[in-house]
């Protein structure tokens, strides 16, 4: 996508211009004053509450072109499949045996993971109240350099995006304070976790390019233990603070701060102790409810790890914010009729699977099923009894 590449280069160049004049090192007191301002209101999200949305372009791959590395990974994948089959073989009578399908797809899956180049564009909307959230992702465009092997068409163990495009095209993640729902709207399948078993996180435009001042290694305590230096310079006649932080874990953060915007980060290069590098470039800042929020964020990553799953380049554009706090209903996932739902409850040993229906009260049926599971072992009953009790209650009768 040429437009995205041009925008990324333009955004990056804003903070790569050479210092023109006025350069001088800040003393310790000046540095600490800036850090105090940056950490005075800890933040892990761009907004404390409201709605934030943007257009997300990403590209990634290949992770390696080394044929020896690729072949070694293929051999390992095939060996792992064979060992799994040997240790716990499924009977040949099983339709679409997943073990055999995985073995058949093993080589292709490795090549796709390591050699494929892709680009993808999506629109993302996050509604947030400081704790609860709704995160909606809708893919509008996707391209891959590796085509899906026709011989593997229909093999659901294939990793190629096209094989799972229906599931990934429109997704929704919600947390209402009690239940975390992951919902493939386009695939018609949802998982509702009321037991806290699934990792729960929200990112997207809510956190893209954000330096979490006041938290983790940017907390006041950790920054006081770090080696911090800064200098004031002018970039194209615009005052700028260049800050370098050598953290105690061996990582280094190099930041460009705009003093006219509350020391908003215009660029950041974060180098981990393992040598991986992430660069943020933020521009088009607007002040919204006392916070400076960018309208464009570019992210570039460099890593030697073939296990990394994050894109090498991201560009967020048209970032918009509505500051009003969303209503409680915003954090509920409205499932379509006939959507298959897997409900994970602390009251049941295994998840409960059902099909959402507007003709039956599925919430009531689910409650009765969970109550039955919770009561097992305390009173004699079986599924037939529960079903009879439900039908009787619908008729206004009772079964003793």
Image: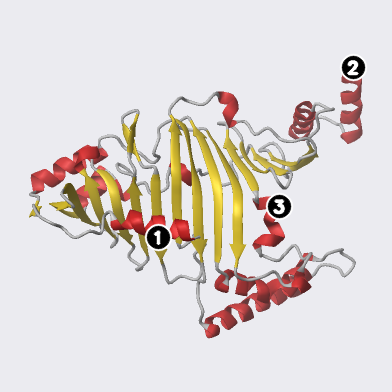
Residue 208 pos. (x, y %): 42, 47
Name which of mark 1 and mark 2 comes first in the sequence.
1
Can you identify the residue that label 1 sits on? 300
Q: Quadrant of the C terminus?
A: top right
- Distance (Cα) linking label 3 and label 1: 28 Å
Name which of mark 3 and mark 1 comes first in the sequence.
3
- Closer to the camera: disc 2 or disc 3? 3
Q: Secondary structure at mark 1?
A: strand
Can you identify the residue that label 3 sits on? 166
Q: Is residue 271 left or right of residue 390?
A: left
Marks 1/2 in contact by CB < 8 Å: the verdict is: no
Residue at 30% x, 43% y is 213
Q: Secondary structure at mark 3?
A: helix
- Location of residue 104 (image quadrant): bottom right
- Res. 1 visible in picture: yes
Residue 42 pos. (x, y %): 31, 37
- Label 1 Cα neighbours within 10 Å, binned few <14 / some 14-19 / many ≥20: some
Residue 274 pos. (x, y %): 36, 68
Q: Is residue 321 left or right of residue 399?
A: left
Relative to 349, is 177 above or below?
above
- Label 2 Cα neighbours within 10 Å, binned few <14 / some 14-19 / many ≥20: few
- Location of residue 92 (image quadrant): bottom right
Q: Secondary structure at mark 2?
A: loop
Marks 3/1 in contact by CB < 8 Å: the verdict is: no
- Closer to the camera: disc 1 or disc 2? 1
In the displayed orientation, state which residue is furthest to the top: 396
Q: Is residue 274 left or right of residue 355?
A: left
């Amino acid at each position: 996508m040429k437009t995205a590449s041009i925008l990324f280069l333009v955004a990056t160049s804003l903070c790569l211009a050479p210092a023109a004049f006025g350069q001088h090192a800040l003393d310790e007191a000046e540095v600490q004053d800036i850090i105090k301002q940056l950490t005075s209101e800890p933040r892990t999200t761009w907004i404390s509450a409201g709605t934030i949305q943007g257009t997300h372009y990403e590209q990634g791959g290949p992770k390696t072109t080394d044929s020896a590395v690729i072949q070694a990974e293929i051999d390992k994948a095939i060996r792992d499949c064979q060992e799994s089959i040997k240790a716990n073989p499924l009977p040949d009578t099983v339709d679409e045996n997943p073990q055999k399908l995985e073995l058949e797809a093993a080589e292709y899956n490795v090549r796709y993971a390591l050699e494929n180049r892709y680009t993808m564009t999506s629109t993302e909307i996050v509604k947030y109240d400081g704790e609860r959230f709704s995160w909606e992702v809708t893919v509008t465009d996707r391209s891959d350099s590796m085509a899906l092997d026709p011989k593997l068409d229909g093999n659901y163990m294939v990793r190629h995006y096209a094989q799972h495009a229906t599931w990934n095209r429109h997704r929704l993640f919600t947390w209402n304070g009690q239940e975390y729902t992951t919902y493939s709207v386009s695939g018609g399948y949802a998982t509702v976790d009321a037991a806290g078993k699934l990792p729960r996180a929200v990112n997207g435009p809510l956190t893209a390019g954000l330096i979490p001042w006041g938290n983790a290694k940017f907390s006041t305590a950790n920054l006081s233990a770090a080696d911090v230096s800064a200098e004031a310079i002018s970039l194209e006649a615009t005052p700028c603070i260049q800050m370098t932080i050598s953290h105690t874990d061996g990582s280094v953060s190099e930041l460009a701060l705009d003093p006219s915007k509350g020391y908003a980060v215009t660029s950041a290069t974060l180098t981990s102790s393992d040598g991986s590098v992430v660069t943020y470039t933020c521009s088009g800042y607007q002040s919204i409810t006392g916070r400076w929020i960018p309208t464009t964020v570019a992210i570039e990553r460099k890593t030697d790890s073939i296990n990394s799953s994050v894109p090498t380049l991201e560009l967020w554009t048209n970032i918009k914010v509505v500051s009003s706090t969303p209503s409680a209903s915003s954090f509920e996932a409205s499932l379509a009729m006939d959507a298959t739902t897997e409900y994970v409850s602390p009251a049941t040993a295994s998840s409960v699977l059902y099909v959402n229906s507007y003709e039956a009260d599925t919430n009531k049926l689910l409650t009765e099923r969970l109550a039955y599971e919770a009561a097992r072992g305390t009173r004699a009953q079986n599924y037939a009894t529960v079903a009879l009790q439900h039908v009787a209650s619908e008729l206004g009768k009772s079964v003793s």
